[in-house]
Image (spheres, helix red, strand yellow):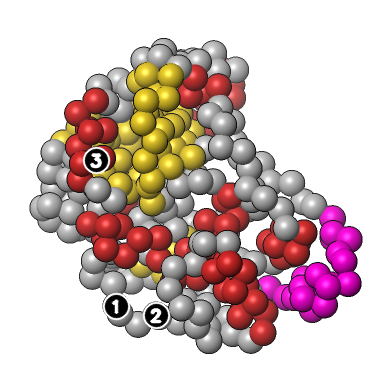
Amino acid sequence: MKKTLAALAALPLLGSCALAPASTNLAATDPSPAPAAVSAQPRPTASATPTPTPEPLDTTIGLRRPTYEDHPRPNLTPVREAKYGECLDVTVSTWSKGPCATLLQEELKRLGLLEGEIQTRIGIPAMNALLRYQRSREVNPDGVAGKQTWYALASGRGPRPTALPRECTEIPGVVLCVDQAHDTLTFVRDGEAVRTIDVRLGGWASDAKTQEWRVFPTANGLWRVYNKHRNPSSPTYGEGVMPYSVMFDPNMYVHYSADFAKRGHARSSHGCVNVATKDDAQWVFDNTPIEARVWIW
């Protein structure tokens, strides 16, 4: 167990929301960047709060890395074969166009994941809808609709269960349980779920400094709340963009997002856990003590 925890502690962190704004300055039109893989983001120091090095917690539950199983090509009915067959070997990602790009958007729209109209090309809303679909179906959330994504769509695979894992129910005290498959945060106290709220997580977003578009993931794992701030300052964005911040990593906070309230899941965070209403954000802020746990899965 110690070796496992030590190894996980050495992994790079991929979120950078606390050092980025709530994407209120994004252009109204979709850019056309080339598809980009998830890459590590350096962790500069936030000016308003201390920045301890996050490390795995000393718990017998331990940490789990997500694994993504490769499924074989599904046996489809003639109707489904006619609908999906030509796309099963087609890769669709950002700025893709054509019949498979349209079909992907139609399916994401049907499932209630795509917010906005279907476009000729795969734009920002469709990319974030795709990432939400991949997380919910336990497909590698890389923002690329390849074989495994198409297999899940063609076979009608449902989302994974909503039941809270034991990391949420067996750790004493307060645990903020962030379910990336269902975009929810459940406030758990001594094993009992007290309140569940909708949240927005990391996704396809623009780097505030380089303007590069890529996937900014919210990192899975077990964390400890080390600080709280009602209105922290960001060296990139300034004041007022992350009210009611519950800080569990220098680059990932739970906080209110005016952009989430305005744009919903069509946009994403840069790794933070966004809350859409100030009432919910303030409630989580007021009821989460320092040293509380945050479990993201």
Q: Which residue matches tag 2?
A: 30
**Does the stretch in magenta take in 207?**
no
Local crowd at mark 3 within 10 Å, few (<14), some, or many (≥20)?
A: many
- Apparent side of residue 100 relative to residue 52 in the rendered image (left or right): right
Residue 30, how many percent across, how many down?
39, 80
The residue range painted magenta reads 72-91
Question: What amino acid is found at the position of numbered circle 2 in the picture?
Answer: Asp
Residue at the spot 38% in from the left edge and 64% down from the top edge? 267
Which residue, given by chain and number where applicable, does mark 1 sit on? 27
Please tell me which residue lies in front, 122 or 82.
82
- Observer-side mark, 3 or 2, equals 3
Q: Answer with the quarter of the image where residue 143 lies.
A: bottom right
User: Neighbour class for label 1 at 10 Å: few (<14), some, many (≥20)?
Assistant: few
Mark sitting on residue 281: 3
Q: Quadrant of the N terminus?
A: top right
Q: Nearer the viewer, residue 197 or 92?
A: 197
Mark 3 to mark 2: distance in Å? Answer: 30 Å
Label 3 secondary element? helix
Q: Residue type at mark 3: give it.
A: Ala
Q: Is residue 93 above or below residue 283?
A: below
| Callout 1: SS | loop
**What residue appears at the point 89 percent right and 61 percent down from the top-left corner?**
75
**Which residue: 43% across, 73% down?**
116
- Label 3 vs 1, first from the N-terminus: 1
x%, y% of residue 56? 45, 25
